[in-house]
């Protein structure tokens, strides 16, 4: 779990975690919508599942269970899944395709919420979306940087951050189920990141957020969260291999 290691941290760190979770809860209305401080005003995207995961995990520590508003948020996001297993509002802006980065936020967040709530139906939704993504990868032999709600992809570049996140989620699904089909696309997701990892001089070891670097996501940048998710994926690979 996202905050499982927090129980071993100093009391001050735990208190800050609880305070943050409580503050986030005050921003939620009874319908499971954030009423302020949204990235886009008035827009509650499905990738807020990543926030729901953190809230549920923190509340599990403080209250022994996620609170009602948090569960309402999770339920509302789960209901945003379309019949073709995409999600509405999974992009940074309304009516825009979702980057693999925000798609992974949506699916990983819901998966971890399903783990916390012991909700098999919630986890099944994630598996169905990941299976649908696998079909797209198999058909095109590549991973798009973004997908709209009809699974039409932008293959002009790679969102390296999202590739790392999706590789990690495939590995987690394999770890939980033992289903080897979840390993099918991990190499394809990680190979371009390894190929473009900077080998010399400034930013040695870093991976650009878009491949090629002129891609639309964080153009010409090495963002710290790209490196974070890449390390997460490699650590999970090492764990599974041990």
Image: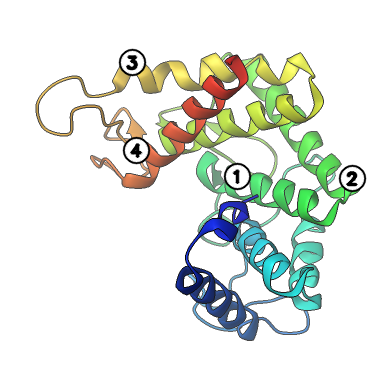
Q: Which residue is mark 2?
A: 120
Q: Is residue 190 left or right of residue 118?
A: left
Q: Earlier in the sequence, mark 2 or mark 3?
A: 2
Q: Judge whether residue 145 can be spotted in this image.
A: no
Q: Which residue is mark 4?
A: 209
Q: Earlier in the sequence, mark 3 or mark 1?
A: 1
> Do the numbered discs 4 and 2 sit on residues whose CB atoms are within 8 Å?
no
Q: Residue 105: image x %, image y %?
A: 59, 49
Q: Earlier in the sequence, mark 3 or mark 4?
A: 3
Name the mark on residue 103: 1
Tag 1 secondary structure: helix
> Do the numbered discs 2 and 3 sit on residues whose CB atoms are within 8 Å?
no
34 relative to 114, above or below:
below
Q: Quadrant of the C terminus?
A: top right
Name the mark on residue 195: 3
Tag 3 secondary structure: helix
Q: Nearer the viewer, mark 4 or mark 2?
A: 2
Nearer the observer, 94 or 122: 122
Query: Which residue is pictured at 42% across the width and 33% down the height?
Result: 231
Q: Earlier in the sequence, mark 2 or mark 1?
A: 1
Q: Residue 19: image x %, image y %?
A: 54, 80
> Do the numbered discs 4 and 1 sit on residues whose CB atoms are within 8 Å?
no
Query: Which residue is pictured at 62% across the width and 43% down the height?
Result: 148
Q: Residue 25: image x %, image y %?
A: 65, 80
Label 2 vs label 3: CA separation? 37 Å
Label 2 vs label 1: CA separation? 20 Å
């Amino acid at each position: 779990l996202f905050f499982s290691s927090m129980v071993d941290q100093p009391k001050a760190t735990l208190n800050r975690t609880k305070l943050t979770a409580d503050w986030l809860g005050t921003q939620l209305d009874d319908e499971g919508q954030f009423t302020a401080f949204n990235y886009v005003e008035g827009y509650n995207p499905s990738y807020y599942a990543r926030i729901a995961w953190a809230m549920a995990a923190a509340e599990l520590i403080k209250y022994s269970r996620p609170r009602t508003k948090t569960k309402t948020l999770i339920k509302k996001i789960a209901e945003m899944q379309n019949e073709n297993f995409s999600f509405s509002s999974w992009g940074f802006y309304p009516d825009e395709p979702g980057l693999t980065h925000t798609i992974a936020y949506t699916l990983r967040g819901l998966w971890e919420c399903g783990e916390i709530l012991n909700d098999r139906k919630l986890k099944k939704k994630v598996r169905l979306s990941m299976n649908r993504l696998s079909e797209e990868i198999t058909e095109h032999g590549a991973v798009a940087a973004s997908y709209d709600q009809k699974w039409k992809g932008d293959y002009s570049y790679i969102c390296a951050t999202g590739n790392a996140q999706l590789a990690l989620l495939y590995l987690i699904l394999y770890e939980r189920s033992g289903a080897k089909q979840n390993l099918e696309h991990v190499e394809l997701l990680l190979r371009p990141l390894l190929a473009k990892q900077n080998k010399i001089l400034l930013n040695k070891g870093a991976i650009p957020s878009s491949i090629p670097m002129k891609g639309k996501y964080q153009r010409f940048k090495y963002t710290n969260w790209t490196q974070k998710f890449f390390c997460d994926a490699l650590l999970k690979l090492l764990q599974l291999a041990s």
